[in-house]
Image (tube, rainbow, N blue to C red):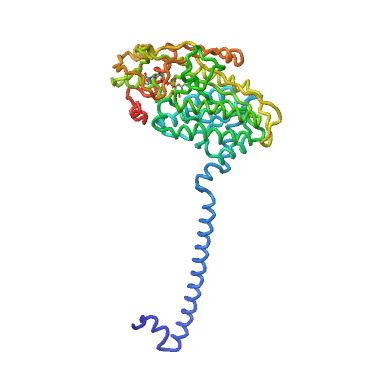
């Protein structure tokens, strides 16, 4: 194949002058090509080393977003108390129902608060984002992360000196365990242990207050339920994981000197509540003219719950933080005994589910279309009733809100949040009702 014309002319010039000029041009071009190759090589090498540097981190951009200078600054500033002798609290599940309320209450009285939440889609995550937005208005920083991320927890404890951890992140819901048992193991067992490991290794160790559940009483028939009652007959996997949590926290208290307070919440309800709970989904269905199912116990007996209003629960949580003794461990070793406490936080006045529906009907000015069904054997218990003497004595806990006034406040919030647009339709738990 003949060589290209231009090249032929360069190699066999028609005149010496031309040869000279062409040879200089040729020389210059060669130099440019060499320079080009060198810079191309340099660029390739640079890109390669950048890429291999990036691969050290799970995701470089999220790494910098999470652990960059401004992330640290946000964590530190959010964790700093604004009052003398204020406490500094890491609240897990901060975008959840109880977590968001407790975070706000602490921040409002001048304590430092950093939230942690994985924003999972067990129920409508947009409600969790709305709670986060509210917290952000009050300068509470909520970190997007999971309690199973040991590296993240270690970094949080490095960035701020938390005096307390309010552990509320969990897989909630009694009946959903039939559908997704592993999410209970992941959050309520594995996540709990990862969090306790971080607490035990932190120096100084924080005091831990965490959410257990009234469901640990399971098939207990002695009423009202007292903390000293047997809790060895759970009726659901959810209850079993909460009971296991009480044992797990006990072992961390015993071995590492972590100060532990477990709170057995009794069916908490109120504004910004959880859409998977009966009072919430009943409200939505009544407004939409859809039927609701009311379960009945043996021989048609109405089921009852010791429904407890969120503000009362918040007071109990804050009092638990305030009275929690210090952890005694250091460098992963206990230096003396630390407090281990368990309290019922209930309302002490159980109300039947049909009565709950009647109160909702009055507040919503609408009639419920009721389907009555026998309670399915999927983890439910017929009734709950809290003895709160211990919480009264040790925490000064005194519930102030009856179901009538609490539901009134819930309905007011529901109407202002959703309007009558029935926005609740987008909730994933819809399919679970
Ligand atoms: O106190 C607790 O420890 C627990 O309280 C609630 O669990 P639960 O009391 O079962 O609350 P709901 O799911 O709101 O049910 C309340 C009552 O309504 C009944 N119900 C529920 C749903 C339904 O469609 N129909 C119905 O009659 C239930 O059987 C129950 O008696 C929470 O969902 C748990 O996360 C929490 O740990």
Residue at the image point whose x is 71% and y is 30% from the top: 335
**Residue 108 located left or right of residue 1:** right
Q: Residue furthest right?
A: 335
- Foreground: 278 or 271? 278
Q: Is residue 429 visible?
A: yes
Which quarter of the rendered picture does the N terminus lie within? bottom left
Residue 92 position, x and y percent, is 53, 31
Whether 392 is drawn above or below 151: the answer is above
Residue at the image point whose x is 61% and y is 13% from the top: 393
Q: Quadrant of residue 119?
A: top left
Residue at the image point whose x is 42% and y is 83% from the top: 10
Q: Quadrant of residue 294?
A: top left
- Foreground: 140 or 203? 203
Residue 114 position, x and y percent, is 56, 31
Whether 429 is drawn above or below 8: the answer is above
Residue 133 position, x and y percent, is 47, 30
Q: Is residue 84 visible?
A: no
- Rendered-image quarter of ligand 1: top left
């Amino acid at each position: 194949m003949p060589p290209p014309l231009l090249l032929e002319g360069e190699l066999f010039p028609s005149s010496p002058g031309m040869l000279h000029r062409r040879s200089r041009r040729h020389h210059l071009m060669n130099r440019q090509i060499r320079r080009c190759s060198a810079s191309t090589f340099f660029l390739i090498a640079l890109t390669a080393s950048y890429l291999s540097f990036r691969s050290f981190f799970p995701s470089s951009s999220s790494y910098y977003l999470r652990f960059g200078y401004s992330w640290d600054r946000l964590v530190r500033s959010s964790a700093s108390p604004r009052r003398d002798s204020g406490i500094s609290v890491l609240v897990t599940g901060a975008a959840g129902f109880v977590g968001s309320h407790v975070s706000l209450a602490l921040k409002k009285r001048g304590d430092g608060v950093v939230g942690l939440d994985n924003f999972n889609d067990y129920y409508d995550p947009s409600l969790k984002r709305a709670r986060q937005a509210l917290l952000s208005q009050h300068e509470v920083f909520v970190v997007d992360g999971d309690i199973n991320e040991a590296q993240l927890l270690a970094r949080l404890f490095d960035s701020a000196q938390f005096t307390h951890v309010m552990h509320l992140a969990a897989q909630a819901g009694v009946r959903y365990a039939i559908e997704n048992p592993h999410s209970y193991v992941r959050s309520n067992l594995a996540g709990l242990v990862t969090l306790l490991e971080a607490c035990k290794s932190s120096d100084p160790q924080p005091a831990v207050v965490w959410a257990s559940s009234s469901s640990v009483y399971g098939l207990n028939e002695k009423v009202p339920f007292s903390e000293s009652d047997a809790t060895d007959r759970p009726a659901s996997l959810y209850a079993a994981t909460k009971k296991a949590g009480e044992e797990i926290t006990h072992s961390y208290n015993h071995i590492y000197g972590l100060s532990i307070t477990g709170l057995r919440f009794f069916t908490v309800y109120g504004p910004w509540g959880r859409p998977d709970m009966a009072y919430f989904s009943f409200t939505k269905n009544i407004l939409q003219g859809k039927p609701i199912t009311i379960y009945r116990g043996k021989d048609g007996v109405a089921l009852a719950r010791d429904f407890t209003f969120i503000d009362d629960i918040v007071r109990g949580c804050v009092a638990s933080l305030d009275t929690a003794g210090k952890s005694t461990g250091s460098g992963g070793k206990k230096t003396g005994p630390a407090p281990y406490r368990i309290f019922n936080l209930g309302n002490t006045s159980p109300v039947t589910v049909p009565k709950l529906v009647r109160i909702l009907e009055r507040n919503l000015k609408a009639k419920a279309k009721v389907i009555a069904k026998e309670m399915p054997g999927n983890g439910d218990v017929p009734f709950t009733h809290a003895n709160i003497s211990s919480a009264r004595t040790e925490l000064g806990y005194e519930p102030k809100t009856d179901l009538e006034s609490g539901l009134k406040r819930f309905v007011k919030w529901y109407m202002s949040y959703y309007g009558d647009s029935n926005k609740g339709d987008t909730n994933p738990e819809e399919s679970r009702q």
